[in-house]
Image (cartoon, helix red, strand yellow):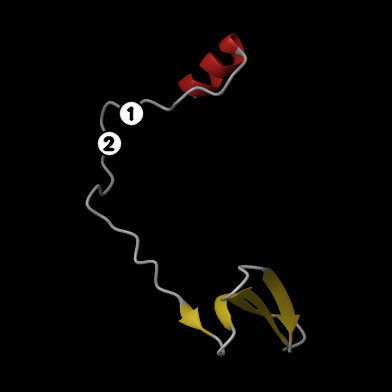
Amino acid sequence: MDACYRSMETKRWEPVVLDDWRGATDTESTGAHVEYDAQHWLIKFERMPDGRRKLILKDKQTGAVTQRVE
């Protein structure tokens, strides 16, 4: 909340300052990609209410993100 009030006063983004951080600091990003097929990485999939699957895919060559419903 302090950062919000400072942002209102300065009219710009202000950092959040935490004197007592209790979260983990030794974590590392796994960066693990799940391969969907030879051309795409699977970013996410969701099960739709009607039973279909919605896939968010990233092209390995171009980096373009697309979605597909199966």
Mark 2 neighbour class, 10 Å CA radius: few under 14, some 14 to 19, many 20 or more: few
What residue does disc 2 label? 21
The quadrant holding residue 38 is: bottom right
Q: CA distance from mark 2 to mark 1?
A: 6 Å
Residue 41 in percent (x, y) is at 55, 78
Task: Residue lying at the far front in this picture: please name it.
Answer: 61
The quadrant holding residue 67 is: bottom right
Q: Nearer the viewer, residue 9 or 43?
A: 43
Task: Identify the residue shown where x is 59% and y is 81%.
Answer: 40
Task: Identify the residue shown where x is 66% and y is 68%.
Answer: 64
Tag 2 near tag 1, CB within 8 Å: yes
**Placement of 34 over or under 11, stated as above or below:** below
The quadrant holding residue 57 is: bottom right
What residue does disc 1 label? 18
Type of the residue with mark 1: Leu
Q: Nearer the viewer, residue 65 or 10?
A: 65
